[in-house]
Amino acid sequence: MTSPGSDLALARAVDDLRRGVAIRVTDTGAALHVLPAELATPETLATLEANGPADLLLTPERAATLHITNQRAAAGARAVLVTRMPWLDLVSSMAAADPAEDLSVPLKGPFPTREPGRHVAAAEAALALLKRAALLPAAFVVADAPPQPGMLTVEALAALAWRRAPRLRIVSRARLPLAAAEACQVIAFRPTDGGPEHLALVIGTPGPVPLVRLHSACLTGDVLGSLKCDCGPQLHAAVAAIAREGGILLYLQQEGRGIGLMNKLRAYALQDQGHDTVDANLRLGFEAEERDFDLAAAMLRALGVARIRLLTNNPAKTGALEAEGIIIVERVPLVLPPNPHNAAYLETKRRRQGHQL
């Protein structure tokens, strides 16, 4: 675990990555200079490679789409290095890192790969930072290069257990009458590591075992009314259900199962090519589920809630809350009819993710 004082370093590292600036990730006796692949330019890559050829860092999920998953470290490392060769230029590297052109440019490689070895902790930390930055988890890396101006040192974490939840704090409370629940108070939470804010809607007068819903933000469904998912209808149905008896809706800023809005839209493009919602995330280099439900447990504890009735079809939410000490007295299903645009999506959630629909 990082110390609270490292939150600022993590926030700065994420900000640098989002601006396409290389950072330095260090572990005991090992270091990697990391440049986000999707934001790399010939100039920034040339600067990085002033200290030697850069390898391409990928997740095993993305490597699986390139058929190079045999290069995982024996200890279960969550990183794959594609060795930089003279013929592996920026365009070819980006074709490996970004699946957008997988159908139009299906033939890639061969890709000589190797295990991260003593750089495994730094490599895993770099990928986790890229995910935190809502970027594709792929980067150009140079090992053990001397520090360069503008490159930030970030201590690598052995277990990558970056729990934002224990360091949440309440920053605001206000009355927020809703169309379906006029008696509503909004409570805003901010993590100390600079991550996105999260909201709790306290609706009516919650009882000793309130009805609780965890809802992950979905701009396309909640705001734009997308028919590709069931998020918007679930949000409105949950507010109405909670309004009937009092309870809490936690609105978590974890778009696209935690991969971020831009990557979710990339996943939509892959779904248009025929991939289901799970495979689309995997092709992008993410896991099928990247959300952190520990956040919800921390929010409930801050509200003084320890026992709940959970409004969900997702057993992963139940398990995550119980693991954090929240007692689930009852699971209450939230089932809505499909439409022609989301029927396959719902079936994938049932078949591949265990949703109890």
Image: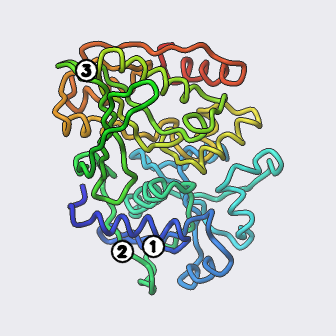
Q: Amino acid at mark 3?
A: Pro
- Judged left or right of residue 106, residue 292 is left
Percent position (x, y) of residue 190? 31, 52
Percent position (x, y) of residue 225? 63, 33
- Disc marking residue 23: 1
Residue at the spot of label 3:
210
Percent position (x, y) of residue 324? 23, 33
- Disc marking residue 183: none
**Disc nearer the start of the sequence (2/3):** 2
Query: Residue drawn at (72%, 50%), measured in percent from left and top?
Result: 100
Quadrant in which the N terminus appears:
bottom left
- Judged left or right of residue 154, residue 304 is left
Query: Residue drawn at (52%, 46%), measured in percent from left and top?
Result: 259
Q: Name above or below for residue 291 compared with residue 137.
A: above
Task: Tell me the crowding category of disc 3: few under 14, some 14 to 19, or many 20 or more residues within 10 angstroms, Cα based.
Answer: many
User: Based on the displayed image, in which of its 4 quarters is residue 277 positioned?
Assistant: top right
Residue at the spot of label 2:
153
Q: Secondary structure at mark 3?
A: loop
Q: Are marks 1 and 2 in contact (CB under 8 Å)?
A: yes
Q: Secondary structure at mark 1?
A: strand
Q: Amino acid at mark 2?
A: Thr
